[in-house]
Amino acid sequence: MSAEEVVTLVAPAAEKSVITGLIACGVASVFFGSMFVPIKRFDAGDGLYVQWLMSIAILVISFCTWLWEGLPQFYPLAMLGGMLWCLGNATAVPIIRRLGMALGILIWNTTNCLSGWAGGNFGLFGMKARPAANPLLNYVGLACVIVGGVLFSQVKGNAPAEPENKDVALESMGNAERDKLSSDDAPLKGATLTETAPANEDSQSANKDRLIGIALALVAGCLYGSTFVPVIYVQDNVEGAPSRGLPYVFAHSMGIFLTSNLLFVGYCIIKKNNPLINNQISLPALCAGCIWIVAQTSFFIANENLSQTVSFPIITMLPGCVASVWSIFVFREIRVCIFGKNCNQRICTKHCDMPSMK
């Protein structure tokens, strides 16, 4: 098959560019895989304060994009996609706490890929079907994604390190919570522990936490995979709707902002106006939001030039590889061994002895 035929199969419209689409895939993959790096070393609490700040940064950057596009028509249905993403992102911090950054991203991107691929390939939810040019290769790739997801779920990372700024996070707790925490820790001061909890109880608790994290990651992936459905539905069914992706970025982000505000207000009500807030995570959370909106805008551009069936498998799986690089070389959540069950044994790659970057 010639290069011209490949271009025709992937991007039949004259204004589409395969090169632009692939560059957008690369940018989106790197930024999606790095979006949680700024907040990784801080205590994020329940994660809702972090998400709220992220949504502010997302809205500001997307508004600039809207201005750049010349204030195109606002399509309210596109906000539904932002709402779905926001609901999925609300589980991100609990997932990362239980599984680590790399494993969490790898697992939720598996169901993200499957959801997005199914919608584009079969034309679900009112979208037009856009099957791949080579169904055999497409299904082989899908099988690899499924197998990879199963293998990822078996990876066991190191327990997350204690946040260096935990004392700052405690300052945001109410008096009753601090007193309870102090009273719980009091017997340990100056005392010698003569008994320890049974190892099997710790193991059962860890396994339960792990299963909860995997379940949350699977649900989050389905929500992430549906985030473009409303936009593509508008493009396919609304007369005169732009075929380009950038005109929808602001409406999409507005859905994120409104949903995040509702979640945060509800969280404050449930916590009786005493939410867990770490002041030091404010700027990193805004940075994370800026990183995400750059990645998501690139995702829109990739969909525009390559179609959802092609772009989704690339952008949903490569960020997990990027996050794995961060986790192995920087955060040391994953240790790579050649032989043996753990990195305490003699034969191990150099990743095990690498000092953690502070």
Image: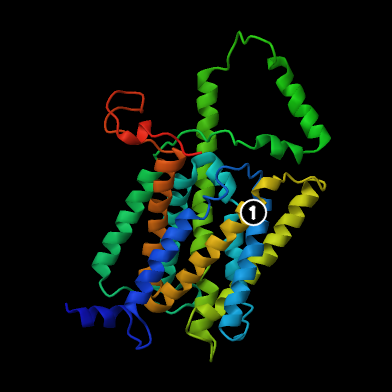
Q: Is residue 343 above or below residue 210?
A: above
- Residue visible at 45% across and 75% down in the picture: 301
- Residue visible at 75% across and 54% down in the picture: 266
Quadrant location, the N terminus? bottom left
Q: Is residue 226 visible?
A: no
> Of the residues shown, which amino acid type is indicated by label 1?
Leu
Q: Residue furthest front?
A: 358
Q: How many marks?
A: 1
- Residue annotated with mark 1: 283
Q: Tell me: 74 left or right of 200.
A: right
Task: Indicate the position of residue 286 as horizontal and vertical percent values.
Answer: 62, 58
- Residue visible at 59% across and 79% down in the picture: 66
Q: Residue furthest bottom?
A: 240
Task: Indicate the position of residue 223 as horizontal and vertical percent values.
Answer: 54, 60
Which color mode does the image show?
rainbow
Q: Is residue 46 visible?
A: yes
Task: Indicate the position of residue 73 as horizontal and vertical percent values.
Answer: 61, 86
- Residue 339 or residue 75, whichever sits in front: 339
Q: Is residue 140 above or below residue 77?
A: above
Task: Indicate the position of residue 230 as horizontal and vertical percent values.
Answer: 55, 74
Assess disc 1: are there few (<14), some (14-19) or many (≥20) residues with their C-alpha within 10 Å of its C-alpha: some
**Where is residue 136, by image quadrant?**
bottom left
Q: Tell me: 184 left or right of 239.
A: right
Q: Secondary structure at mark 1?
A: helix
